Image (spheres, grey):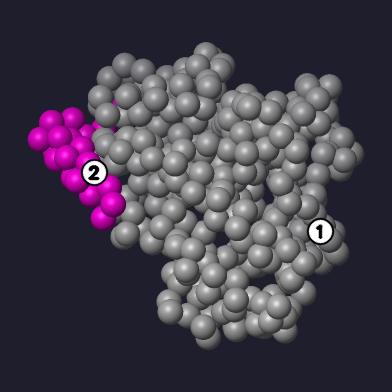
């Protein structure tokens, strides 16, 4: 048996008729960028996330970058984030000229550890850019109360968390802004790049509308430097179809995750869900001290796995000027050594899942 990590082609086959209809409408419309499909998607996603504004951009990285730029963050500023995330989270901070300041993660959830936050805030701190890693919302109550006491805005990197919630509120609706990615492998993924910024703040939304379009609000009138960073109509058309199944597919992932956990508990370390969370399992990551042996065993059995993330960001070569060394963020470093993501996607069958579970039990020497 082969168990792929994802099945994007299978997902296309399932939704193919609706996607082809939506795409053909765009092709015939003559409107390809910033048109009606994009505006409709923005409205639908603002309502879904629960914010006043949702603005389509070219990708999740730009969503983060434009948010930082709209907040005026740049040279001499500090932005707090974690070293255990996709590279782009810290990359955009450095791209603005600001300094990424890392705070270690909570070992149970892999999200920013609120107990370490206050000590990292300085007079230069201009934002906390937290991540809802793997689809689980960070500890917003504690983080927001610390940030608010220090007058520091919170930005959510919700690229892995479309539909995740905490105390009934959706990811992307807590901070000054939420940043999303429609990269094909994300829970709401297009057939190319795409991104979104959610916010309740009218001024911030206005700035982003200019920044994503060459600093222009009126054709050929430019009031600032911006970017060309817009969501195109073809992606919006695909996303509008996939949005209809988002909740059902997140529910499917959750059911599969619960099933993995039921069968793997006590054999490997299974993911923890903090109280009041609806985890959407963009990834289902286990931990094992024998991670590499386990991954090799699964690969030999035709089971694909992934490692998110093998190198914590403070140890990335490009950030060596920050002067960090091994041991600085021990929780992130241990997770990087031990973590392993198992196949989880809406088309994974229980038969395939049983095969994965059995293979993990074999590797752990437990045939019970
Ligand atoms: C995917 C991802 C991004 C970047 O999104 P792109 O659309 O690929 O630019 C940023 N942060 C996190 C946590 C992500 O998972």
| Residue identified by numbered label 2 | 19
Q: Is residue 314 magenta?
A: no
Q: Tell me if residue 214 can be seen.
A: no
Given residues 264 and 339, the one toward you in this image is: 264
Measuring from the top left, give residue 125's x and y in whole percent: 77, 33
Q: Residue at x 36, y 36 (%)?
A: 244
Residue that mark 1 sits on: 331
In reply to whether residue 20 is colored magenta, the answer given is yes
Res. 155 in view: yes
Question: Where is the C terminus found, in terms of image quarters?
Answer: bottom right
**Residue displayed at 65% across by 82% down:** 362
Element under disc 2: helix
Front-most of residues 165 and 181: 165
Q: Position of residue 344 (x, y in %)?
A: 51, 59
Residue 183's disc is: none
Residue stretch rendered in magenta on the structure: 13-34
Residue sitting at x 44%, y 69%? 4
Q: Residue furthest left?
A: 28
* Residue 133, x across and y down, in percent: 64, 48
Q: Residue furthest top?
A: 202
Q: Is residue 9 above or below residue 209?
A: below
Q: Quadrant of residue 354?
A: bottom right
């Amino acid at each position: 048996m082969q168990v792929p990590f994802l099945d994007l082609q299978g997902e296309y086959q399932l939704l193919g008729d609706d996607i082809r209809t939506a795409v053909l409408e765009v092709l015939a419309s003559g409107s390809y960028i910033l048109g009606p499909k994009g505006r409709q998607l923005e409205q639908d996603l603002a309502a879904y996330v629960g914010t006043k504004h949702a603005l389509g951009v070219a990708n999740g990285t730009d969503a983060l970058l434009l948010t930082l730029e709209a907040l005026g963050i740049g040279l001499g500023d500090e932005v707090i984030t974690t070293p255990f995330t996709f590279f782009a989270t810290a990359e955009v901070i450095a791209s603005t000229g600001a300094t990424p300041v890392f705070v270690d993660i909570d070992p149970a959830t892999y999200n920013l550890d609120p107990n370490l936050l206050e000590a990292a805030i300085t007079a230069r701190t201009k934002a906390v850019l937290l991540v809802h890693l793997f689809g689980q919302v960070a500890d917003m109550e504690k983080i927001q109360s610390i940030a608010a006491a220090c007058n520091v805005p919170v930005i959510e990197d919700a690229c892995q968390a479309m539909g995740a919630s905490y105390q009934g509120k959706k990811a992307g609706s807590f901070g000054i802004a939420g940043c999303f990615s429609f990269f094909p492998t994300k829970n709401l993924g297009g057939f190319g790049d795409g991104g979104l910024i959610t916010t309740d703040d009218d001024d911030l939304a206005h700035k982003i509308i200019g920044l994503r379009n060459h600093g222009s609000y009126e054709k050929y009138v430019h009031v600032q430097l911006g970017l060309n960073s817009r969501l195109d109509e073809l992606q919006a058309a695909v996303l509008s179809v996939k949005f209809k199944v988002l909740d059902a597919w997140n529910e499917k992932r959750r059911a599969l995750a619960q099933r993995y956990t039921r069968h793997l508990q006590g054999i490997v370390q299974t993911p923890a869900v903090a109280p009041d969370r609806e985890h959407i399992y963009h990834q289902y990551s286990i931990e094992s001290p024998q991670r590499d042996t386990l991954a090799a065993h699964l690969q030999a059995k035709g089971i694909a796995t992934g490692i998110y993330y093998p190198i914590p960001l403070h140890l990335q070569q490009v950030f060596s000027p920050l002067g960090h060394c091994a041991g600085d963020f021990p929780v992130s470093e241990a997770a990087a050594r031990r973590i392993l993501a198992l196949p989880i996607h809406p088309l994974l069958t229980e038969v395939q899942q049983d095969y994965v579970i059995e293979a993990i039990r074999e590797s752990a020497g437990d045939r019970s």
